[in-house]
Image: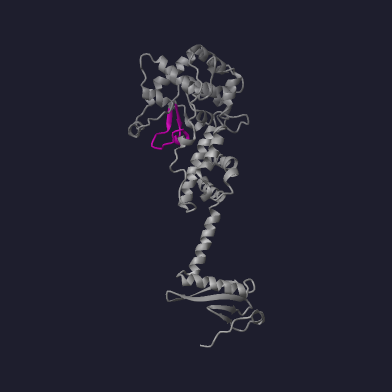
Amino acid sequence: MPKIELLQDIQIKKAKPLEKEYFLNDGGGLRLLIKENGAKIWQFRYTLNGQRKKTSFKTYPTVTLKEARTKRQEYQTLINSGIDPINHIKQIKEENILDINGMFLNVANEWLDKESERTKESTHKNKLRAFEKDIFPFLKNKHIKEIVIKDIINIIEKKQLQAHEVATNIFTYMDNLFRYAVLKDYCERNILADIKRSDIIRAKPVKHFSKITDPYILKELIESIYNYNGGYSLRNALKLVLHIPLRAENLCNLKWEYINFDKKLLTIPRELMKVKDLNFDDFKMPLTDEVINILKEQQLFTYHQEWIFLGTNNRDPINNESPNRALQRMGFNDDKKGKKIRLHGFRGTFRSMIETLDIENKFSFEVKERALDHQENSKVVRAYAHKSDYINQLIPLMNFWSDYILSLKN
């Protein structure tokens, strides 16, 4: 077999394209392909495990003759060790991509994009805010494999001093993010897997919503609400919540379509309640005569609209905080004197006062809880309880409560 003469740079530079492509050989499997269009492409041919293979090194002069020979030597070293150069290069590229994608900023943004598809917009905004404000400033330039538990503890402990709930959420976000990173092979383990949230985050002291249980102060509250002149929607919303202890979200977003005057019934879709389990029926509440009167009065102003209680723009529902501000303006902001209440406190007032007033035990515990849409924690009990019709039992309870409110007013 004739000896292959080594290529010279001058020879490569002078090589001209012909009608057909041809090769200039440098030996050891290295050759230069001269294309019809003048392109000059390095190729390396080799045999591994009895199979003939071929790969390329880009073009000349991007890869010089010297660099091509160096690559040939690197590839030959791999082949001598039983490693396929093509697979080796592919693996390195994949690892480089994984390495770039594994930067914490990239992993977090990828996870947040996935999360946005399954969470409410408002919830996702809070999540983004926590990352941008509290997490990214400390971790964005690190690879996720480099992050240690101390990094996360420092972030959480700092945030815990400012906002306990956000600190708690950050723990959950990071735990879920690391689970995702393990799934995507960006890191080998979830560093939070063996850590309890309570090991890092101190329990927040429980602060119950202020409620009014003194009949004299409750009488003052009722009279102040019925005489409130800060807008018909706010006045009637507060009057309504005196008689039906709805949560703020449900009260402020009531729609006329939820009201059936003929059946004297309020029905709120289950998915709009705090407990959204669709195994439960929609929330249903009988309407007392006084509640009907309140709604009839409100009809004069908003019956042609979707929402029952309109805000100042006469288009959207009242803000959840507007009734609370109205209560403050009425003077119900003194906790020490037992004269402070917010919307949620009406529920506590209802539950406490009913327990006190029901001296003959006319109303069952279950019915009192159902008026607040409190659901039984036991799955077995819930499976049967959701099928029960409490409406007939709620009617006397709500009439009793409504009559009591009016007796204090009068």
Against 382, residue 61 (above or below) is below
At x 48%, y 16%, the residue is 213
Front residue of 294/166: it is 166
Seen in the picture, residue 34 relative to 400 is either above or below; the reply is below
Q: Residue at x 32, y 34 (%)?
A: 380
Image-quadrant location for residue 304:
top right
Task: Identify the residue at horizontal 53%, vertical 70% (top origin).
Answer: 74
Does 358 sit left or right of 13 as displayed? Answer: left
Residue situated in front as seen by the camera: 216 or 62: 62
| Residue 14 drawn at (x, y percent) | 67, 82
Q: Position of residue 27 (x, y in %)?
A: 55, 80
How many numbered marks have been drawn onto this rendered protein structure?
A: 0
For this rendering, which residue is in front, 285 or 106? 106
Percent x, y for residue 283? 43, 31
Q: Is residue 59 visible?
A: no
The stretch of residues the image draws in magenta is 265-284
- Outermost residue to the bottom: 2
Query: Is residue 272 one of those drawn in magenta?
Result: yes
Above or below, 31 against 354 in this view is: below
Residue 162 is inside the magenta segment: no
User: Residue 7: percent from the left, percent from the top?
Assistant: 61, 81
